[in-house]
Amino acid sequence: MVPIIIPNTLKVKNLFTPLLSFGFTLISATFAQAQVVTIPVETAHNALVLQSNVAKQLNAIYYGKKLSNAPEYSAIPDTYKQAEDYTGLYNAAYTAAGSRNLLEPAIAVTHADGNNSLDLRYVSHEVTKQGDDVSLLRIELKDPVYATNVTLYYKVYYKEDIIEQWSEIRNTEKGTITLQKFASANLNLKANSYWLRQYHGDWAREMQPEETQLTHGIKTLDTKLGTRINLFMPSVFMVSFDKPAGEDEGKVLYGGLEWSGNFKTDFEVDPQNNLRIISGINNYASPYELKSGESLTTPAFWYTMSDMGKGEASRNVQNWARDYKILDGKGQRLTLLNNWEATYFDFNETRLSGLLKDTKSLGVDLFLLDDGWFANKYPRNSDHTGLGDWEENRTKLPHGIASLDKEAQADGVKFGIWIEPEMVSPKSALYSKHPDWVIKQPQREEYYYRNQLVLDLTNTQVQDFVFHTIDSLFIKAPGLAYIKWDCNAVIYNAYSVHLKNKQSQFYVDYVNGLYKVLKRIRAKYPTVPMMLCSGGGGRVDYGALQYFTEYWPSDNTDPLERIFIQWEYSYFYPAIASSNHVTDWGKQPLKYRIDVAMMGKLGFDIVIDKLSAADRKFSQDAVKIYDGVKQIIWHGDQYRLADPRTGSVASVMYVDASKSSGVMFNYLVNSRYGEGSPTPFKLKGLDAVKRYKLQEINLYPGSKSGIDSERVYSGDFLMKIGFNPAVNTSRSSVIVQINEVK
Ligand code: GLA
C-alpha cells in the first residue's frame, strides 16, 4: 500500500473506512494504481469525487449519489466508454490555461516573464472539521515549472448537501504575475442531456425563468454592470440531468456565486458530451495583478444536487441559508409600514407623525422612512438631487431623525430608515467637494443611471465616508432599528482616480471595498436588521446576504406578478429573507395583496388612512393572523404544490419541523371564466400517521369559508388524495392553516 498524505488535523484510524462521520473519506491507492489518490467529498446523499492520477493531475471523476462502499468510487471512470479525451484534462478539477488544455479554463495566468502557460499538479490535501455539520477540504496544487500555487477549498455542509467551493491563488514568483482568469469553481458532470434553467430580468421584472437544453459549446451567464449587478441576470441557476426536473422527481443541480459584483458562469458541453461548469468573478476588463508574495482568494460558488427534484434542492438551500448564510437566519424579523409609495418625496414631520400612529394602529413593528429625508443645498425632492448629502433636510425634518426616533418610541413602534450610501447625485455638496470620489471617466461626458453616479469604494477614504454615514445615523438616533440599504445605479464609465494605473482591478476592488464597509458596520452593529435593496432585486446573492437579514425582491409589488417572482426566488432563498410589501400596485383586492405578501416577511406600503373602515380592520386582523403563522413561514419547510406557470392556481405550503402545524397559500392566477381548483392539491411534508384539521384563515370581514374546519384528515390522506382549497374567481386567494389534532 502506498502511503498517502494524511492531514494533521485528522485523526485517522483506518484508511479504508470513512474518516469522519460525514464529509470526507480518503481512499488509499492500490499497488496497481500507484500514486492515485481518491478524495470523495461526501454529503448526506451525494459525493463529489476528486482524484489525483499517476501524473498528479487532479480530476473530478464523479458528482452524484454517494456509494455505500467508498473504495468503489475509483472504478467509476472505467464505466464510461466515451470519445477520446485528447488532453486527459477535460474533467480537471481546476482547469489551467496555456499548457495542453483545449477547453474553457478556470484559471489563466501571465507569469512575470510574459509566459502564458500554467499546469497545476496535486501536492497534498487536508480536511478540517469546523463543526458537527461542516468541514473544509483544502487541496494544494502547484505548477512544476512556475512558482504559482493554487489552493482549492471545498466547504461541505453535510446535512444540507451543499458544497461551497473557492480557490486561493498565490504568486511565489519573484516578479508580478497577472491573473487573466480566476474562477472559483470548475464542476464536471455526466449525463445524456443537460437542461439549464436560468433567469433574466430588468427593473420590476426580476427572476424571469427560461429553460433550455444545453448544446455543445459554451453558454455563458454573466454580468458586467459593476453594481446593481442582477438587474439583467442573477448568478443563480439550475441544471437538470437527462430531462427537466420536476418539483419532486428528477436530478437537479442548483448553484450561484457569492459575489455582489461582475460574475461569469460558463456551461460547456464538451466533446465527450460532459458538462463543465466554470463560475467565478467575471474576468471582463479585470486582469488582476499579484505582486510577489501576494494572493487572491476568490468568492465561494455554492451548489447542491438532488435526485428528488427541485423541491428538495430548494429546501436544502433554504436550510443552509438560514443556518449559515443570511444574517440572523434563524432569528426574528420586524413587520413594517414603509412610506415610499404612500408619500414618495413629499412629506414633513406632521405627515410622518401620522404614519407613526398608523404603524401602531396597523399593529406592525416598525415604521420605515424611505427616500427623501436628506440634503439641504440640493434638497432630495426628486431623484435628481441630494444623494451623498446625508444630513436631514431642514424643511421636511426640522427636528431631525433623533426626534422621529423618540416619537416612534413614544408611540410604541420602532423606527427604520432608507439610505443609498454608495451613490452620489451630480447635484450634491458631496460631488462638488470630492469629484475624485466619483466613478466616471475623466475625459468623457458623464452618463447617469437614475440621475446618479456611483462612489468609488476602492478608495479607503470613501469606505470611511460610507461607514461614518451609517454610523452617524445610529449615533443620532440610538433607537434606530432597521436600515434599508439601496443601490439604484449601475456603473457606467468605470474609472477610479484612486486606482491610477491599476484600473483593471476596479471591479474586484469595488466589491471588496463594499464588503469591508459592511464588515465594519456589522462589527459595530452586529444584529440590526438591514434590507438589501437595489432598485428592486438588483443585488441578491449570498455574498451580500451575510450582512443583511432580508432582501427586496422587486419594486414590482403587483401581487399577481409577485406570485411568479417570489416563486422563482424561493428556489434559492428562504421566505424569511423575502421582504414582501402590500402596495397599491395591481388590480387585485386587498385580501389577495396581503395574502401574497404573507409568503415571506410582511410589510405595508399603502396610505392606511385612505383605507375604508373594512379594509383597515381587515389589515389589522391580517397582521395578527400573520403573527400567528409567521414562525412556520420563516422557519418551516416550504413545499410547492401547484405551479402558476402550468395551471390556473399557485399553491405553496410551509410546515414546521415537528410536522404539526402548517399553512397553505393558494392564489388564482388566471381570471378566465370558470377557472379555479377543480381538483385537490396533494399536501407535502406532513406526517402520514398524524391527524390534522384544516381551517381557512384571513377571511375578509363578512365572508364565510366553505371549508369544514372540524373535519379531521390523516396526513396520509392529505398527501395522497390532497385537499381542495376551493379557489375560484370569487375566492381568488385562500389561506389554509393546518393543525395537528392531538
Ligand atoms: C428604489 C427602491 C424603492 C425605493 C426607491 C426610493 O427604487 O427599490 O423601494 O426605496 O428606490 O428612491
Image (cartoon, rainbow, N blue to C red):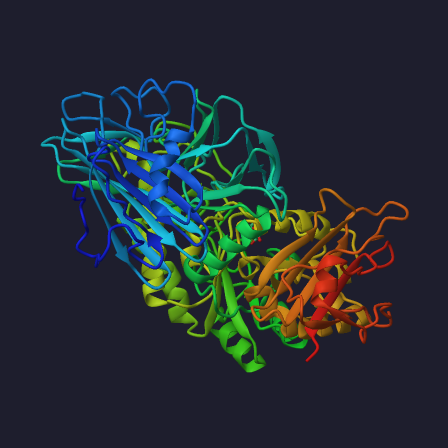
Residue 326 percent across, percent down from the top left: 45, 59
Q: Residue furthest right?
A: 673
> Taking 78 as reference, is 627 left or right?
right
From the viewer's side, name the closer residue of 734 and 47: 47
From the viewer's side, name the closer residue of 9 and 320: 9
Residue 475 percent across, percent down from the top left: 37, 70
Q: Is residue 300 above or below residue 711?
A: above
> Taking 224 as reference, is 612 left or right?
right
Q: Is residue 741 above or below residue 733?
A: below
- Name the quadrant of the C terminus: bottom right
From the viewer's side, name the closer residue of 302 and 289: 302
> Taking 177 as reference, is 165 left or right?
right
Q: Can residue 362 be seen from the camera position used here?
A: no
Residue 640 percent across, percent down from the top left: 65, 53
Question: Residue at 38% of width from left, 48% of height from top?
Answer: 69
Question: Residue at 46% of width from left, 43% of height from top?
Answer: 256
From the viewer's side, name the closer residue of 628 and 616: 628
Q: Is residue 215 above or below residue 35?
A: above
Residue 719 percent across, percent down from the top left: 70, 60
Q: Residue furthest left?
A: 174
Question: Residue at 80% of width from left, 61% of height from top?
Answer: 725
- Looking at the rendering, which quadrant does residue 723 occupy? bottom right
- Count up the numbered dots: 0
Q: Can residue 627 be seen from the camera position used here?
A: yes
- Name the quadrant of the N terminus: top left
